[in-house]
Structure formats: C-alpha cells, structure tokens
Amino acid sequence: MNSPLIEILACVAAYLAGSIPFGLLIGKLVFGIDIREKGSGNIGATNVSRTFGAKWGIACLILDALKGLLPVWLIPIVVSSTSATSSVQLVGVLTGLSTIVGHMFPCWLKFKGGKGVATSLGVVLILGPIGSAAGFVGFVICMAMFRIVALSSITAALVFGSCQLIVLRPDPFGESLPLALFSLAVPALIIARHKSNIGRLWRGEEPTFKFGRTKKHDDPAETPPDDPAEVPPTDAAPSP
C-alpha cells in the first residue's frame, strides 16, 4: 500500500476516534439527558461536571483524553510496520490533528462538538510531553488564581505552543517542521473554539468553576451557553 493512502486512512481513523462524543453518551446512557440542552450546551468535561457531578466530569475528561492519546500512540506503530516510506512523525502529527478536529467537529453531531482541550491533552502527551507538562503547570497556576476553566485552558494552550517552539527550535527545512506547525495549530484551534468564552471574559461574565456547580450560577442549567443561538429556548432558558 502506498504512503499517501496509508496516511489518508490514518487520518480518517483518527477523526472517527476523536468524534466519539463521550460527554453526550454519558448524559444519554447514564442519565437519559442530552448534555447539549444543559448548562453551556457543550459536550465536554466541564459541562458534564457542572451538570452531573465531579466523578462524571472526571470520567469524561479521561475518556476524551484517551481518545486523543490512543490513536496517536497506536496508528504510527501500525503505519511504520506496513509502510517503510511514511514518516512516523508526520503520521503522528496528522493523526493528532485529525483526532482533535474530530472532537471539535464530529460528523455525528452536525459538526458541533467540544472545545478539544482534553482530547488535545491526550494527543500532546505523546507528541510533545515537555510542552504538555509546561501547559499543565500553566493550567494549574491559572486555575488556582482565577478559577476560570476557559482562561486556564487558553493559557495552557499558549504555554504549550511557546514551550514546544523553544524545545524544537525548528529549522524551516528540518525534520521538526511538522511538530512545529502542530505546536502552532493546536493552540490556534483551542483559542478559536473559545471565542464565546473570550467574549464573556472581556465583559467579566465568564463564571468561575467549582466541581458540581459554578460559583456565579448555582444551578448548572444557568451557566451561559457557548453560543446562545444554538441552544433551543425553554421555560428555563440559560441566562445571557
């Protein structure tokens, strides 16, 4: 099998793995509730935790991280054993990006998915362990100071990207170019997916976080939606 075809198949497999909506599945299978109709309307671990409690938020976080980690770990191994011409690093980068995009834009949910932070964490643990460690420290420090998940996630993404570029010191024509581009693309995707959060941060309306509920909004259903236009009106509509 030729190299381009293998790489395309690797991307498709990774995308499908990333598009598994664990937050939605937890809500539907365990509670009979569509998580998209609760809180922020997001399918990620933060909204799951606010809606169903800490243990389910942690479960969603772990599952979303694993669906990022496992494809990036396993697919390059399979590719390297079937194609001597494929670059393992390039396949890893393509697989990682495909997995993250799958979570953010799942075909099963009309391409409306999560923010991609937990899935990105799983991916970068394999592709950029030093950068991911620095990003984690940045997240913890920011979370301890401000208790705002969105701000902490954006901070972690920026710290990861900056640290990766310092570690790689990429030569534009060198072997590190795919990883360097990956280290720029992931923070850009995460920041773009937090567009609505950035708007609320600017207005001082982004809620602080505590497992099980938000500090500003005691009822999880009152957490501001990520995109109010996408949340159907109800008798208990989320506050703006």
Image (spheres, helix red, strand yellow):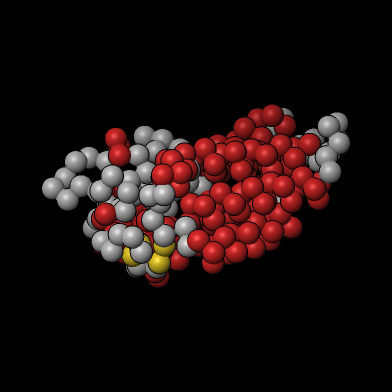
Total numbered badges shown on the rendered structure: 0
Q: Is residue 22 visible?
A: no
* Left or right side of 157 for 234: left
Furthest residue to the bottom?
A: 55
Q: Position of residue 95 (x, y in %)?
A: 63, 42
Frontmost residue, 98 versus 39: 39
Q: Residue at x 77, y 45 (%)?
A: 165
Frontmost residue, 90 versus 153: 153
Above or below, comparing residue 83 to residue 131 in the picture:
above
Q: Position of residue 220 (x, y in %)?
A: 29, 59
Frontmost residue, 215 versus 81: 215
Above or below, comparing residue 12 to residue 64 in the picture:
above
Q: Position of residue 18 (x, y in %)?
A: 51, 46
Q: Residue at x 29, y 35 (%)?
A: 229
Q: Position of residue 185 (x, y in %)?
A: 64, 38
Point out the image quarter for the C terminus: top left
Point out the image quarter for the N terminus: top right
